[in-house]
């Protein structure tokens, strides 16, 4: 038996497939048009292909209060949360994806407490509120191994679980391994992601936070995405400096890890701040209320990571360094631990859906060229 | 309302918006009265998806040129000459490069949709459809300073010796009056007024489904005819197609259409066929089927296809009624099984073998059958069988107000009313006396909306200078 969300998505997309006015907005509608009927896998695939730009909601002649009650962004957002649960591994953690902010909040609080504990006992009494200067200052609070081992483990675990989720999603939405090896499709999808193509709407942006077309969300999302990549580069580089080159943190302001991290942190701060602001302003009608907490928690946590990181950089020669370090590490730990059980999943499944879509459209075009006698 | 507006626009669809924006850009104060609530604003334009216009070269969304003579010949073909050549050519000429003006007012286009490639050269498709275009126009109108009242239904116009002085309208349960130097009537036709339709179609109209909004009740048309305006167009003519009988009574729009007729047979309540289902390509024939179904007992018909044809046409919104045999199908549809089996057997026996091709006027036809099926005739013999109930779906009416090339409403004595203008469906009958051509209603609305806005502004500004 299909879930209510699947039934509703099927009902709505059946109406859309008989209308097709929105096909110029994004990839969802052209993908829908390749089908006459929708399997559960198709519906989950289309739901994750949706970027929630909302163009189709405001353009829809059947949107509420019309009796057909077509609300594509909301319907697909609800189904996405269900996809996240269905593809969640281990299954035991499925209930973490309940759409609320509680799991992320709890895990982050717990992680911060653990870091505090480590700092309290690692650095000795009073060390938390003292000034520490020079190379290895951080390790005087938290021993080297206590910092490296848990974080490497958390990051590795997150990557493993996300990778597993990707394969589960791929097969659950009807994709086969051969399709996954289509390099051209991956390049196409990567390009779609890098430019956030489908937050462009038809060229004027999304209808977000309200009915007006705007590029603001796309720009803020760009800042988050690229800021995140810069921070990742900074952290990886710092890892190399520290563990392979033997240069212990903290690093001078004019060093690659700090420069990249500062730039990335600022971009993250602006991007997440902007997205939080837009979220508070957004029209709730096309939104899925049940995942609001989860969505907000993710952006807030990223905001906290970048804010504490930047403050740590600014104030690392003051006695507040210890507190900031604990907060920053707590947030980073919370972020990595909850990575596969929150809003971050959208990037993995969205990418998979885009890759599947690129391959599908390539094959479709090749097929119709073969069948078309004029071609 | 105490304020004296330069231009009062009655209506809230494409023509009304084009008139309002144009008059406002000319420097007039403009008030628009839209009878629908905000969520349903835009009249039947919200159900449209493209507009046909003259252009001398292709662009990002049109595949090639479309010139006046070809446009005119296309119009002549569909109207069978039921058009006013001077006004029609005027519309065609004024439509030249309309896309640029629309884009400047917020409209966005996309290349022709899959399945509508026959329109790719002549018609520009709105990104997101007609409602998206209306949203863009409302946003632009708002930015320009056009005042809009929703749920404001104009009930009557006050005329003083043929000169418009004021309009009485209901707004949120209150009766109000507004004065204006000029009025533009752009309030659509009367296809949602079943009582009026019954006057010309008889009781059959009770079973019509209105494809568009429930707000097009023809009040302004009636008011002006009562004031002695000269009518145009045949009241018994309307654009009606056969749509899924399960569609809502109003506002079902595009998704209720059914494109399966050429691939099956259509029977009436008595289980008998009544017209050649394969006369021509569906886009050339769909518009006659509303009238054909309206002429059948109880205004109902059923299209039957079999498993061979289910994937040959655009999917529709309601699932087909499915059966393993013709007898079972008859029971599901509430038809006499014997009659239906007899019809299908007779049809199957009359089908001559031939090469089936859905994209061509193929050679699959019946022999010795009345009515014949000229193309795409294949025996109904492969279960499961699929059935779709059909009803007449009325899209628009032809009866309207006679206008001049300057969009002035012509009175019974042949004189144009000095300050009453009309645009859109209320005057489309001048140009479209019969038949229909995709995207042409929006052409008339946009061109005449702009003319009405321009001329109304000219008149209003002259008046205000004098006073």
Image (cartoon, coloured by chain):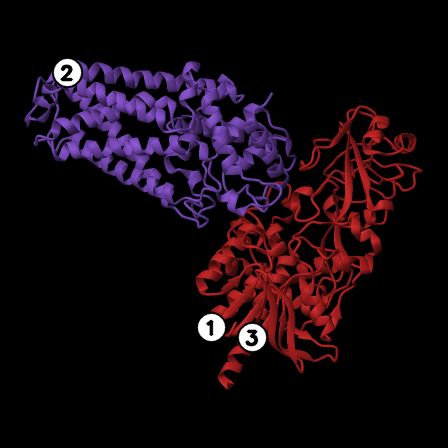
The tint of chain B in the picture is red
Left or right of residue B153: residue A196 = left
Label 1 resides on the chain identified as B
For label 2, the SS is helix
Q: Position of residue A60 (x, y in %)?
A: 56, 45
Q: Residue B179 shows which numbered tag? A: 3
Residue that carries the numbered disc 2 in the rendered image = A144
The tint of chain A in the picture is purple
Label 2 resides on the chain identified as A
The crowd level at tag 2 (other Cα within 10 Å; few <14, some 14-19, many 20+) is some
Q: Are marks 3 and 1 on the same chain?
A: yes
For label 3, the SS is strand
Choose top left, top right, bottom left or bottom right for residue B439. bottom right
The crowd level at tag 1 (other Cα within 10 Å; few <14, some 14-19, many 20+) is some
For label 1, the SS is loop
Discs 3, 1 touching: Cβ within 8 Å: no
Earlier along the polypeptide chain: callout 3 or callout 1?
A: 1
Q: Is residue B252 visible?
A: yes
Give the residue furthest to the bottom: B466
Q: CA distance from mark 3 to mark 2?
A: 82 Å
Residue that carries the numbered disc 1 in the rendered image = B27
The crowd level at tag 3 (other Cα within 10 Å; few <14, some 14-19, many 20+) is many
Q: Position of residue A83 (x, y in %)?
A: 48, 24
Q: Position of residue B254 (x, y in %)?
A: 65, 45
């Amino acid at each position: 038996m299909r879930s209510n969300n699947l039934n509703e998505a099927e009902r709505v997309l059946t109406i859309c497939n008989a209308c097709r006015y929105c096909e110029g907005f994004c990839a969802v509608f052209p993908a829908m048009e390749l089908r006459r009927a929708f399997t559960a896998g198709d519906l989950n695939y289309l739901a994750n292909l949706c970027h929630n730009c909302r163009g189709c909601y405001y353009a829809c002649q059947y949107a509420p209060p019309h009796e057909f009650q077509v609300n594509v962004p909301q319907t697909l957002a609800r189904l996405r949360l269900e996809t996240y649960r269905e593809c969640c591994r281990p299954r035991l953690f499925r209930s973490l994806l309940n759409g609320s902010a509680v799991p992320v909040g709890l895990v982050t609080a717990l992680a911060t407490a653990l870091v505090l504990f480590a700092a309290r006992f690692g650095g000795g009494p009073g060390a938390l509120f003292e000034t520490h200067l020079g190379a290895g200052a951080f390790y005087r609070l938290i021993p080297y191994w206590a910092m490296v081992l848990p974080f490497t483990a958390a990051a590795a675990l997150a990557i493993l679980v996300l990778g597993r989720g990707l394969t589960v999603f791929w097969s659950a939405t009807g994709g086969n391994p051969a399709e996954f090896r289509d390099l051209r499709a991956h390049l196409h999808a990567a390009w779609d992601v890098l430019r956030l193509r489908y937050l462009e709407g038809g060229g004027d942006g999304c209808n977000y936070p309200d009915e007006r077309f705007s590029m603001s969300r796309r720009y803020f999302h760009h800042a988050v995405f690229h800021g995140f990549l810069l921070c990742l580069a900074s952290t990886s580089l710092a890892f190399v400096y520290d563990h392979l080159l033997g240069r212990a943190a903290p690093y001078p302001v004019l060093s690659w890890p700090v420069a990249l991290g500062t730039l990335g942190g600022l971009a993250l701060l602006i991007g997440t701040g902007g997205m939080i602001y837009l979220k508070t302003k957004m029209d709730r009608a096309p939104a899925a209320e049940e995942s609001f907490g989860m969505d907000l928690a993710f952006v807030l946590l990223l905001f906290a990571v970048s804010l504490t990181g930047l403050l740590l950089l600014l104030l690392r020669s003051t006695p507040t360094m210890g507190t900031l370090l604990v907060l920053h590490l707590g947030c980073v730990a919370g972020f990595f631990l909850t990575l596969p059980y929150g809003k971050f999943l959208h990037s993995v499944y969205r990418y998979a859906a885009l890759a599947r879509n690129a391959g599908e459209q390539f094959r479709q075009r090749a097929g119709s060229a073969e069948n078309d006698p004029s071609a | 309302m105490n304020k004296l507006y330069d231009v009062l626009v009655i209506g809230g669809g494409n023509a009304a918006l084009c008139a309002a924006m144009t008059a406002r850009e000319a420097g007039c104060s403009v008030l628009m009265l839209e009878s629908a609530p905000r969520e349903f604003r835009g009249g039947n334009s919200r159900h449209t998806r493209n507009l046909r216009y003259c252009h001398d070269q292709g662009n990002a969304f049109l595949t090639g040129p479309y010139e006046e003579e070809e446009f005119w010949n296309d119009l002549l073909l569909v109207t069978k000459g039921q058009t006013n050549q001077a006004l029609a050519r005027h519309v065609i000429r004024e439509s030249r490069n309309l896309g640029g003006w629309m884009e400047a007012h917020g409209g966005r286009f996309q290349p022709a949709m899959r399945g509508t490639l026959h329109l790719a050269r002549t018609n520009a498709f709105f990104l997101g459809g007609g409602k998206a275009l209306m949203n863009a126009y409302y946003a632009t109108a708002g930015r320009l300073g056009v005042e809009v009242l929703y749920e404001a239904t104009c009930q009557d116009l006050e005329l003083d010796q043929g000169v418009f002085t004021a309009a009485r309208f209901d707004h949120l349960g209150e009766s109000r009056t507004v004065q204006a130097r000029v009025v533009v009537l752009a309030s659509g036709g009367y296809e949602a007024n079943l009582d009026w339709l019954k006057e010309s179609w008889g009781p059959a109209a009770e079973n019509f489904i209105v494809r568009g909004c429930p707000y097009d009740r023809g009040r302004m048309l009636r008011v002006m005819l009562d004031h002695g305006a000269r009518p145009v167009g045949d009241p018994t003519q309307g654009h009606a197609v056969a749509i899924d009988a399960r569609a809502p009574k109003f506002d079902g729009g595009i998704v209720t259409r059914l494109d399966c007729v050429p691939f099956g047979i259509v029977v009436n309540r008595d289980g008998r066929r009544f017209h050649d289902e394969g006369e021509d390509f569906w886009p050339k024939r769909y518009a006659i089927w509303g009238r054909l179904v309206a002429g059948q007992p109880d205004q109902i018909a059923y299209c039957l296809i079999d498993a061979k044809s289910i994937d040959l046409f655009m999917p529709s919104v309601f699932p087909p009624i499915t059966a393993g045999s013709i007898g079972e199908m008859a029971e599901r549809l509430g038809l006499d099984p014997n009659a239906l089996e007899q019809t299908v057997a007779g049809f199957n026996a009359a089908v001559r073998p031939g090469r089936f091709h859905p994209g061509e006027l193929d050679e699959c036809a019946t022999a010795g059958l009345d009515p014949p099926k000229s193309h795409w005739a294949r025996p109904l013999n492969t279960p499961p069988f699929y059935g779709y109930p059909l009803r007449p779906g009325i899209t628009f009416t032809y009866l309207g107000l006679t206008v001049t090339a300057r969009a002035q409403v012509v009175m019974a004595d042949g004189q144009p009313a000095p300050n009453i203008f009309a645009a859109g469906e209320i005057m489309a009958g001048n140009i479209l006396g019969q038949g229909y051509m995709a995207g042409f209603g929006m052409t008339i609305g946009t061109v005449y909306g702009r003319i009405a806005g321009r001329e109304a502004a000219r008149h209003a500004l002259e008046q205000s200078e004098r006073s």
